[in-house]
Amino acid sequence: MPTRVKICGITRPLDAAAAAAAGADAIGLVFYGPSPRHVTLDAARAIVAALPPFVTCVGLFVDAAPEEIEAVLRDVALDVLQFHGRETPEECQRYGRPYLKAIAMTEGVDVRAAEARYASAQGLLLDTHQKGRPGGTGQVFDWGRIPGDLGKPVILAGGLSPANVAAAIDQVRPYAVDVSGGVESAPGIKDERRMREFCRYAKGEV
Ligand SMILES: O=C(O)c1ccccc1NCC(=O)[C@H](O)[C@H](O)COP(=O)(O)O
């Protein structure tokens, strides 16, 4: 089975359609105000409407209030939630949707303990840790810190690009790869050619 690809931080309907055409299995919408990739409810609805069938839409939150998440869920057809903050497992699962828990790959992180704690998660998204930046850092972390015997699907994130995604997959063997800055021409603006390249390398087509 080829490695799945999630392209995160989509802010425009045309980028969503281009991501799907490039071969992305999922796209991510950032509902976190301080991010340059933050989307409004109107933008999110338009992006979802631009997606063909069978492309998963993931909504991303950072310690958001439940009322905020519920308001998004009422308006936007999200398939999966992704939590990048200090949300507890109970907070992640209260919406009755599948969810991914992002784990910041700090020096001393215990990924196995995180896996046990977030037993209800559909998968773990392992991302670079940078103080004050809960995601979208554009930086790679040391993939050697990922235990090889995790039971849950691993979504590898952090500084991936067409240039390094094949090596990352070779070393980590993740369930999926997640990219944002590595396929952009500017924050929040995706580059069609880079998305195509990324998907081809991730799926072993080159
Ligand atoms: O993308 C953001 O701006 C962002 C802000 C706050 C929390 C998460 C955010 N992105 C989450 C993602 O899933 C990114 O794709 C992931 O962090 C990798 O980003 P990059 O290193 O730029 O590929």
Image (cartoon, rainbow, N blue to C red):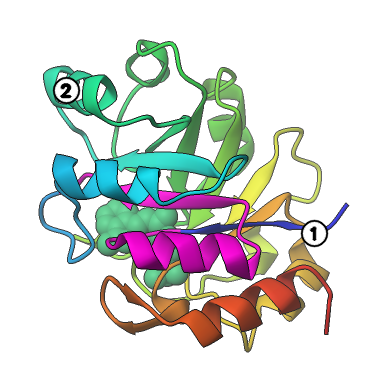
User: Residue 106, relative to residue 48: is it above or below?
Assistant: below
**Residue closest to the eye, 181 or 91:** 181
Identify the residue at horizontal 39%, vertical 67% (top origin).
15
Kind of residue indicated by mark 2: Ala
For the C terminus, give its image quadrant: bottom right
Q: Which mark is drawn over residue 71?
A: 2
User: Residue 35, relative to residue 98: is it above or below?
Assistant: below
> Depth-wise, is mark 2 or mark 1 nearer the camera?
2
Residue highlighted by disc 1? 173
Kind of residue indicated by mark 1: Arg
Q: Give the SS element for disc 1.
A: loop
Q: Is residue 117 magenta?
A: no
Q: Position of residue 148 (x, y in %)?
A: 79, 51
- Quarter assignment of residue 4: bottom right
- Note whether residue 134 is visible: no
Q: Tell me if mark 1 has few (under 14), some (14-19) or many (20+) residues whose alpha carbon lies within 10 angstroms of its own.
A: some
Q: Position of residue 183 (x, y in %)?
A: 46, 79
* Region rendered in magenta: 8-32
- Ligand 1 resides in the quarter of the picture at bottom left
Identify the residue at horizontal 11%, vertical 50% (top origin).
33
Q: Is 17 displayed left or right of 33 in the figure? A: right
Q: Distance between the Cα atoms at labels 2 and 1?
A: 36 Å
